[in-house]
Amino acid sequence: MTAARTIRRWTLALVAAVAAVGLLRTLAVAPFRLPDGSLVFVNRWSYGLRLPLPSLAGYARWLPEPMEKGDQVAFDNPLEAGSLEFRQVFVGRCAAAPGDTLHLPLGAWRIPRRGEYAEVTEASKLILQEALLRYERLQAVVGSDGRLYVEGRPARKVRLTRDYYWMQTADPDRLIDSRTFGLIPMELVIGRIIR
């Protein structure tokens, strides 16, 4: 083998390795600017890689992993309309995961796992109404009688088709907190914050 050919092979191998590392870093760790101007780095693989362009190709995660209570995460603004790719990014702490019990002002309520029924209580009816309207794409309204109506029928329990997490911020004066967001589906979660 000639010296020129050896150099060319090594150069191609080096370029391929650099490109592979660059692609992996782009997919694995990404910087995001928060509404307050600060910069955070997010591990996109921490809960499985959310595949790009979910507004065009649909939501999917490669090798999904569940989020755990206490995780510091970045997620897309759930109050913004439009495609996920262009929403503001917020950070928060996972205060409750599917199966955990929330302690709310009007009582305790258990967050159901995907496919389970959620009990409609005085504490949960507004939370459920928001999740049903925003993410489950069902008509839901709390009537003048104080009951939750789903698709025009009174509901004592509802089935949720996604896993939802209760996000809170450590500094509610700087960021919108979970009292505004309510339940966050996994499709909005980008990944875990890297310290």
Image (tube, helix red, strand yellow):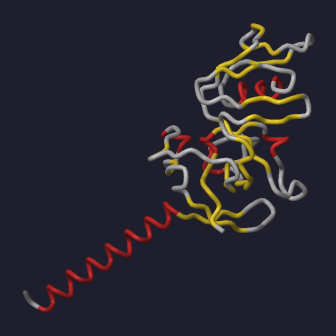
At 59% across and 29% down in the image, what residue appears? 114
Left of 36 or right of it: where is 186?
left
Residue 40 percent across, percent down from the top left: 68, 66
- Give the number of marks: 0
> On the image, which quarter does residue 134 sit in?
top right
At 49% across and 41% down in the image, what residue appears? 60
Left of 31 or right of it: where is 126?
right
At 9% across and 90% down in the image, what residue appears? 2
Q: Is residue 79 above or below residue 143?
A: below
Q: Is residue 186 above or below residue 134?
A: below
Q: Is residue 153 above or below residue 62?
A: above
Residue 25 percent across, percent down from the top left: 48, 67
At 61% across and 61% down in the image, what residue appears? 42
Residue 3 percent across, percent down from the top left: 13, 92
> On the image, which quarter does residue 138 sit in?
top right
Between 50 and 82, the one nearer to me in the picture: 50
Residue 65 percent across, percent down from the top left: 52, 46
> On the image, which quarter does residue 149 sit in?
top right
Work out which quarter of the rendered image holds the C terminus and state it. Answer: bottom right
Left of 82 or right of it: where is 101?
right
Residue most extreme to the left: 1
Work out which quarter of the rendered image holds the N terminus and state it. Answer: bottom left
